[in-house]
Image (tube, rainbow, N blue to C red):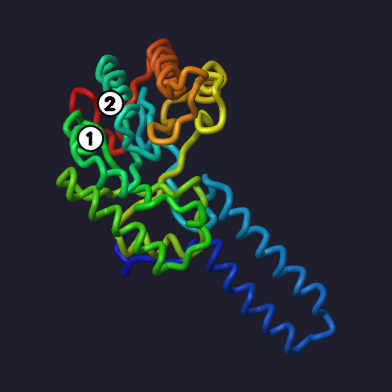
Amino acid sequence: MSETGWRLSPFLRASVGLHAAGAAALVFAPERWPLIVGGLLLDHAVIGAGVVWPRSTLLGPNLTRLPGAGREVALTFDDGPHPEVTPAVLDRLDRRGARATFFCIGRKVAAHPELAAEIHRRGHRIENHTYSHPNAFGLYGSSAMEREIRAAQDAIAAATGRAPRLFRAPVGIRNPWLDRVLARTGLRLVSWTRRGLDTVGTDVERISGRLLGGLAAGDILLLHDGSSARDGGGRAVALDALDLVLDGLAAAGLRSVTLDGGTADGA
């Protein structure tokens, strides 16, 4: 979507209208200010929920499921590439004929361009996860957001020869300015259907269980190659969790594809 076709989300358009109506009401019926201010505060609370809820569509379009899925899901990995973990993830995916989408941090791609190129060469997608993964990204203004996003675009395109078309916000948190920035940069927001929480837990069974419990075609699954927690031996828990998830997909008759719909056989 280009910026010329961009519009505020229906919810934000309604919010703007509510604020305009509230301002007019304060002029013509100032005695009702508690009710008016209360309504505006409630509106801001809902906006806040849209900011911190990664799967929300209140602030703009947000891909939370694989479109047009048959017996397919989308495995996604965040925060890489990692020089030790990412190659191990790639080998596991290759052994199962699975494809995945890697939301990569631009500065890590710049540090390991050969690894980013290898992800691309093996038939996976590399998409935009900002240049430096700022945890305060959701508090950024539009200019700062755009600098982060464009820097990552440039780093990934330089390493792979292909500019990303998808974007995932750091920790899934964004604000009302992001949708317009994505329109300017030609990107589409993606979150997930279910995540393993492999950055904060080390129980591999629980991590895989969060991804496989209630699994359905079209789900977008989230693990981390770049920031996975480590077990007592220093091993990234995402690796063993991935093995269990791939077993679960096979048992359910599902296959993992990239978010553009590409599959292991190029269909």
Q: Which residue position holds label 2?
A: 87
Q: Amino acid at mark 2?
A: Pro
Q: Position of residue 96 (x, y in %)?
A: 29, 15
Quick one: quadrant of the N terminus?
bottom left
Q: Is residue 132 left or right of residue 111?
A: right
Write the residue at 41% across / 47% down.
168
Q: Position of residue 36 (x, y in %)?
A: 76, 75
Secondary structure beneath dot 2 equals helix
Direction bottom: furthest residue: 27
Q: Amino acid at mark 1?
A: Leu
Instruction: Relative to 206, say whether 66 is above or below.
Output: below
Q: Which residue position holds label 1?
A: 115
Picture mark count? 2
In the picture, the disc for residue 132 is none
Res 118 → quadrant: top left
Instruction: Relative to 71, say whether 220 is above or below.
Output: below
Q: In the image shown, does 259 or 240 lie closer to the viewer?
A: 240
The mark that comes first in sequence, 2 or 1, is 2
